[in-house]
């Protein structure tokens, strides 16, 4: 969802930075926000802080980060260019569609609903529905199962390194969206191709017959 359907990266970066400032903690990595891309907040926190984090602390800090993100997101979000036209075309063609996201169900449905994208998806699988976040393939295998689609017939669009890893571990094709990482970084993890956005993208250029 984030970075593929919704251009939300800037808000996430600001929220993580604000959380670190509240904690008076320096990030464990110069490009700290890259450590968080595609991961549930609870799993990103130990990487971000550079130390072990208890489950209770991770949950508390993840909720605070979510609140900070909501504050920034209230200023306005935009879909990734061309994505609504693309998913609307998939819906008209009867192509099964799912979202597999590290966000919570409440956040996913709220954000997608606000942007008018929720109606285009048959299945939404969130962090609330799986035990392990990306790069585990669980979220994508669950989405495929709910769609009734064999994993090998699925194509995943991903902006994150861990998301590309998850898709490939699920036995699915992966197309990288370069809203967070470079094309080279995404291809190195198994993306078969990359796109900057969905402008002009057609399903017939992707499908294999």
Image (cartoon, rainbow, N blue to C red):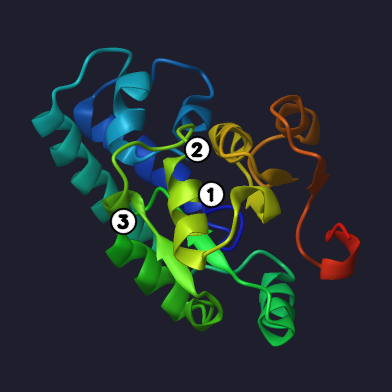
Which residue: 58% across, 52% down?
3
User: Relative to 87, is 178 above or below?
Assistant: above
- Mark 1–mark 3 Cα distance, whole angstroms, equals 16 Å
Residue tagged by mark 3? 104
Which residue: 22% across, 34% down?
22
**Residue placed most toward the observer, 176 or 152:** 152
Residue tagged by mark 1? 9
Q: Mark 3 falls on what kind of element?
A: loop
Q: Mark 1 falls on what kind of element?
A: helix
Can see residue 3? yes
Judged by depth in the image, the label closer to the viewer, 1 or 3, is 3
Residue tagged by mark 2? 37
**Residue placed most toward the observer, 173 or 209:** 209
Marks 2 and 1 in Cβ contact (< 8 Å)? yes
User: Relative to 178, is 169 above or below?
Assistant: above
- Mark 3–mark 2 Cα distance, whole angstroms, equals 15 Å
Can see residue 177? no
**Residue placed most toward the observer, 166 or 80:** 166
Is 95 on the left or on the right of 31, as rendered?
A: right
Residue farthest along the bottom direction in this orientation: 92
Residue 198 percent across, percent down from the top left: 77, 64
Give the mark, 1 or 3, whose residue is nearer the N terminus.
Answer: 1
Marks 1 and 3 in Cβ contact (< 8 Å)? no
Residue 120 percent across, percent down from the top left: 56, 80
Q: Mark 2 falls on what kind of element?
A: loop
């Amino acid at each position: 969802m984030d970075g593929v359907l919704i251009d939300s990266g800037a808000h996430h970066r600001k929220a993580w930075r604000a959380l670190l400032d509240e904690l008076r903690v320096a990030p464990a990595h110069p490009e700290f926000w890259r450590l968080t891309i595609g991961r549930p907040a609870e799993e990103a926190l130990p990487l971000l802080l550079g130390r072990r984090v208890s489950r209770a602390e991770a949950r508390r800090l993840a909720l605070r980060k979510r609140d900070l993100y909501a504050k920034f997101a209230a200023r306005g979000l935009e879909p990734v260019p061309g994505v609504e036209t693309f998913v609307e075309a998939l819906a008209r063609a009867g192509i099964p569609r799912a979202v597999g996201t590290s966000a919570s169900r409440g956040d996913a449905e709220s954000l997608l609903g606000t942007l008018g994208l929720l109606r285009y998806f048959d299945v939404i699988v969130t962090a609330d529905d799986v035990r392990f976040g990306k790069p585990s393939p669980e979220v994508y295998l669950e989405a495929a199962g709910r769609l009734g689609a064999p994993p090998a017939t699925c194509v995943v669009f991903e902006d994150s390194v861990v998301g590309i890893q998850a898709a490939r571990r699920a036995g699915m094709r992966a197309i990288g969206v370069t809203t967070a990482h470079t094309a080279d970084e995404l291809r190195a993890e198994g993306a078969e191709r990359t796109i900057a956005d969905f402008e002009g993208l057609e399903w017939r250029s992707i499908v294999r017959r």
